[in-house]
Amino acid sequence: QARTLFTHNIFLIGFMGVGKSTVSDYLSTILASPQVEMDQVIVDKEKMSINKIFEEYGEEYFRNCETNLLIELQKKNNQIVSCGGGVAMREINVQEMKKNGRVVLLTASPETILERVKDSDERPLLRGRKNTEYISELMEIRRPKYRAAADVIVDTDKKSVEEIAEEIVAKL
Ligand code: S3P
């Protein structure tokens, strides 16, 4: 049963493996809002895996796909959008999200992240670098931009998806 009605979009941002997709899945159910998984939409549009897009066209091309998709998403509201981990790095992306949305940053420790990404082959940026040192390093670089973009910050370490979703709804 839907409890709250949000008219704007909700964008979940944060590092790879922080649980954006899982949480957006759950949120879309309890809020009865459509869900948009950005990586998946891009894969479907390009008819290519994320790895393949990076290999064939390079990261910049993928980043442009993300920006174009964010612009397109402004046409609708009430969506729960699970962003790729790099979305908040571009200022124009942040501006697009803020036009008609609230931005929720999910965080987790490098140890938790490693645990969640260690069996995934679909993260070109972590290929051959799945260790807490590298994850911490990249996280440090990204942290200021993630924080600057966020309206709400929710830590996900040792919390269930239900608890995380509750916290988001309470803080929004
Ligand atoms: C990326 C995160 C990935 C995906 C791509 C780049 C990043 O999404 O968009 O591999 O730059 O952090 P997830 O955060 O869903 O893993």
Image (tube, grey):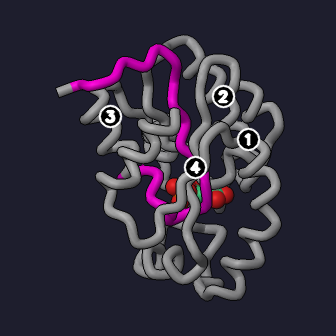
Sequence order check: which comes first, mark 4 or mark 3? 3
Range of residues picked out in magenta: 2-22
Query: For the residues carrying marks 4 and 3, which lies nearer the camera in this image?
Result: 3
Residue 73 appears in which quarter of the rendering?
top right
Q: Does the residue at mark 1 contact the one at mark 2 (Cβ under 8 Å)?
A: yes
- Residue bearing the label numbered 1: 149
- Residue bearing the label numbered 2: 97
Sequence order check: which comes first, mark 1 or mark 3? 3
CA distance for labels 3 and 2 = 18 Å
Q: Does the residue at mark 1 contact the one at mark 4 (Cβ under 8 Å)?
A: no
- Residue bearing the label numbered 4: 84
The question of residue 166 being in magenta is answered with no
Query: For the residues carrying marks 1 and 2, which lies nearer the camera in this image?
Result: 1
- Amino acid residing under circle 2: Met
Using residue 75 as the reference point, say whether residue 4 is left or right of it: left
Q: Is mark 4 within 8 Å of ligand 1?
A: yes
